[in-house]
Amino acid sequence: QVQLVESGGGVVQPGGSLRLSCAASGFTFSSYGMHWVRQAPGKGLEWVAFMRYDGSYKYYADSVKGRFTISRDNSKNTLYLQMNSLRAEDTAVYYCAKSSTGYSSGCLDYWGQGTLVTVSS
Amino acid sequence: QSALTQPASVSGSPGQSITISCTGTSSDVGGYNYVSWHQQHPGKAPKLMIYEVSNRPSGVSNRFSGSKSGNTASLTISGLQAEDEADYYCSSYTSSSTRVVFGGGTKVTVL
């Protein structure tokens, strides 16, 4: 069965950096696009970033563009999110989610349990 | 990229039907049949309930159905049950540079 396990969350000071990982299993990771989605405490879902199955295309929300970088290692079945210049408003649970296709038009069909990122001094 | 518009809350009694709307533009909901709906219980990860406007993944109850008219998609829950009480989010592919957009979420309460 599909499993997505996020890690790397924690407490970081404003302006700091953090790298999240998402270990995938139960499907052919290299054939599917992958997303990061976040949810601030008590708020709704906010899409963050997407990477195509082969890494050839990446898309970002305007709120993180230039600060966050999505990447993947298909040999390790792992998705990453490098977060730099973190702000208080980046505080959220970060979920990785699998796309139903290799492309951005696919739906988010499986979600991980999330990892909490807290940006605070 | 603006979020898709959903009502903040919808409620119904057990056994009733409710409908949640999701309004976008011709660049997202109206332009593509790539609308999905996700259910989220408190403290849990979201779960896909409907994809490509009206398709149900394996294992999702047929009490859940989706449709679209113009720039507005809808999720209908029939035979409302206590376990349906949750937050529901729509999402859509968009032609904007971001490619994906979510709705603000709707809290469903079973009275």
Image: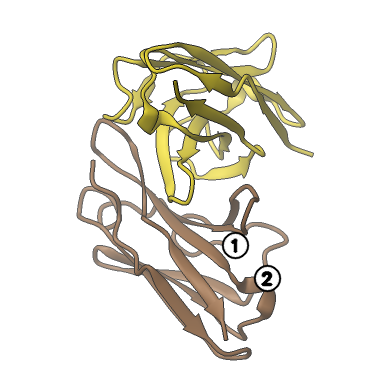
Chain colours: A yellow, B brown
| Along the viewing direction, whichever of B25 and A54 lies nearer the viewer | B25
Q: Secondary structure at mark 2?
A: loop
Please tell me whether residue B44 is drawn above or below residue A105 in the rendered image: below
Q: Nearer the viewer, residue A2 or A13?
A: A13
Residue at 56% over, 90% down: B16
Chain letter for mark 2: B
Assess disc 1: are there few (<14), some (14-19) or many (≥20) residues with their C-alpha within 10 Å of its C-alpha. some
**Residue in view at x 62 percent, y 59 percent:** B41
Amino acid under label 1?
A: Arg
Residue type, numbered disc 2: Ser
Across and down, in percent, residue B2 comes to 23, 47
Q: Does the rendering let one see residue A108?
A: yes
Residue A116, image x and y in percent? 58, 32
**Residue A9 at x, y = what percent?**
60, 23
Q: Earlier in the sequence, mark 2 or mark 1?
A: 1
Vertical position of residue A29 compared to residue B34: above or below:
above
Q: Which chain does the numbered disc 1 sit on?
A: B
> Picture quarter containing residue A74?
top right
Q: Is residue A33 visible?
A: no
Crowd class of label 2 (few under 14; some 14 to 19; many from 20; radius 10 Å): few
In this picture, is A70 found above or below B38?
Answer: above
Q: Residue at x 64, y 51 (%)?
A: B43
Q: Which residue is mark 2?
A: B61
Instruction: Please name the residue that numbered disc 1 is placed on.
Output: B56
Local secondary structure at mark 1: loop
Q: CA distance from mark 2 to mark 1?
A: 8 Å
x, y percent for residue A78: 64, 17
Q: Is residue A75 left or right of residue A61?
A: right
Residues behind callouts 2 and 1 on a single chain: yes
For the N terminus of chain B, the quadrant is: top left
Q: Are circles 2 and 1 on residues that touch, CB within 8 Å?
A: yes
- Closer to us: B38 or B26: B38
